[in-house]
Amino acid sequence: MDKQRIFHLAVLMIVSGVSQSALGQGGEIRPGENLVIQGLPAIPASLADEVRRYTESRSASFADWHPTERAMLISTRFANTAQIHRVRQPGGARTQLTFFNEPINGATYEPRTGRYFLFTKDVGGNEFGQIYRYDVADGRVTLLTDGGRSQNGGIEWSTRGDKIAYGSTRRNGADRDIYVMDPLDPKTDRLVLEVTGGGWSVLDWSPDDRQLLIGEYLSVSESRLWLLDLQSGQKSLLTEPGTESVSYRNAQFSKDGAGLYLTTDKDSEFQRLSYMDLATRQTAVLVDSIPWDVEGLDLSPDGRRIAFGTNEAGISRLYLFDVVGRKLQRVDAVPTGTAGGLKWHPKGRDLAFTTSSARSPSDVYSLDTETGEMSRWTESELGGLVATELSEPKLVSWPSFDSREITGFLYEPPARFTGKRPVMIVIHGGPEGQSRPGFLGRSNYFLNEQGVALLLPNVRGSTGYGKSFVKLDNGLLREDSVKDIGALLDWIGKQPNLDASRIMVMGGSYGGFMTLATATHYSDRIRCAIDIVGISNFNTFLKNTESYRRDLRRVEYGDERDPVMQEFFERIAPLNNAEKIGKPLFVVQGGNDPRVPLSEAEQMVERVAKNGTPVWYLMAKDEGHGFRKKENADFQFYATILFAQHHLLGGL
């Protein structure tokens, strides 16, 4: 879940500039009171000016269409955090509507007249998101949910547009129950489905608003679909479990309510566009000619066309499917890169989406599906960078220990850097994430100014390569993915343009675990490592992660209550193998992280420091699972540059 954030954690893609208040009188960049540091050297103030053009790029993402006008809400950052803006026409001015110290997590218009929109926001990255209403007429903001330590989100509007259904953990902090509310009257909020587990969500309302389509996420490989009758409160299972694990995603009611359009990997390695007849509960494949995952779909308001994307070796493709004529059309006008957030305008015809590439930060486009004309709604600034000078990735592959082919994306520095180049291996999180060829943001600095090659592997367990590949690192197979990195180190050693004696490994979240594991297994083959919000021991991680996540993570990693699994976790824990880390380590952590708790970082730093290995530590008290605020991200970036200069590039 939350896959769009996983890669960003690893490659430090938050872009921003340094605050003048952070500049100390001694010509140093002084950390704010919210930052805890250990082992870091003084950061010279001159560094901020040196790297400024790499920290000033901006990105934009689509939030929602206005229901009656050809206008939209987008998310972008002008100051310290991403906020909601209105854009009235392609290329139009971005008018900021929300002004909070915390970033806003999406927005959705009231679908009848657009007189208000809803958004979610947490505090300090704790991910206890609350739902708010923004009244367009006067800018007044009203809290709609409990405001406490609960997660609230996954908003879906009723067909009539007068109610929302959403998920919330407020009952006990662990189970994600389903609620219905009229946003104009928070007192109407009512529990309609009490569940067990944190993986439940609302997918759609039936056309007559009598039923809710509910998803139950069990793991990346298994999920279920349910129908909830709102009058009786009874739910019925649509997808009976079989002998194989099956994943169902992106489900929506057909216009007549007789069936569902969805994607599923039933009888396939990949997610395929399919249709379920609700009377028979039988599922038929609509498109089986694309040997890649279908990701994201949206049914046109008239119910005649489906827009969907595919993930083809990491590249996004956009398709339109004629429901009546069963005809498939590929849209070639979409910029090459990654794309998502597909949504039809309520009046039909216009289809919005967000796209990015190695040479362009994410921006919002729309497609006129009648004429094929593409409109660009935002043009995010590169902050002084020149697009044509940014490296485009190459798809590379190498054989692993079991002869299985593993792939990744290699970004090479400009040709003016001669000789074998140092390498940063950047490992994605998830573990069911996937490194894809998007915009690197500030990480372009390492390519363009330090001459470092960036290599982003997709080790076993990554999505995008079929469901069998995803399962190859489950449970007791966990360290097989670490061996994929060992095989990558072998491959680097055979490349004439890469320097196997100067390698830094880094990653965020599960990628942080992979970084720590690589540092224990291959300490003699790397120069240094950066662990960002990483897991240092699966036993302590599963004990302390938020309760609404625990069972979902046990399915992927293994159940620590099983003595065999518990012993395995203790044996492979980087924490318990810290004496093998002989190269400098930099640990970055958010103090409010609900996913990988602060304790995972603290115990690792303490253990490595006891061994006498150089260790840097940076913790932000007002961040969670990765740094999202400009000033914090700035400091992390400057510290990362110094770490690379000291430990990866020293002597060059």
Image (spheres, grey):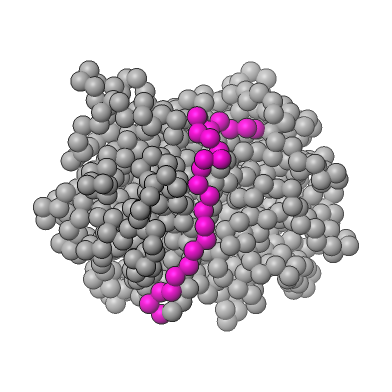
Seen in the picture, residue 48 relative to 62 is either above or below; the reply is: above
* Residue at image location 42% in from the left, 41% down from the top: 448
Residue 480 seen from this side:
yes
* Residue at image location 23% in from the left, 71% down from the top: 571
Which of the pair 336/343 is nearer the observer?
Answer: 336
Q: Is residue 391 magenta?
A: yes
Which of the pair 561/70 is nearer the observer?
Answer: 70
Which of the pair 342/408 is nearer the observer?
Answer: 408
Give the image quarter of residue 266. Answer: bottom right
Residue 111 seen from this side:
no
Residue 329 on image: x %, y %: 80, 58
**Residue furthest out toward the bottom:** 243
Residue 403 on image: x %, y %: 43, 79
Q: Is residue 370 magenta?
A: no
Residue 161 on image: x %, y %: 74, 39
Seen in the picture, residue 515 relative to 459 is either above or below; the reply is: above
Total numbered labels placed on residues in the image: 0
Give the image quarter of residue 487. Answer: bottom left
Which of the pair 266/374 is nearer the observer?
Answer: 374
* Residue at image location 62% in from the left, 32% down from the top: 379
Task: Specify whether 158 is left or right of 563.
Answer: right
User: Which residues are the magenta region?
Assistant: 378-402
Task: Specify whether 415 is left or right of 267.
Answer: left
Task: Specify whether 219 is left or right of 421.
Answer: right
* Residue at image location 29% in from the left, 22% down from the top: 23
Residue 130 on image: x %, y %: 50, 38
Task: Specify whether 356 is left or right of 319.
Answer: left
Seen in the picture, residue 192 relative to 41 is either above or below; the reply is: below
**Magenta: main secondary structure:** loop
**Residue furthest out toward the right:** 325
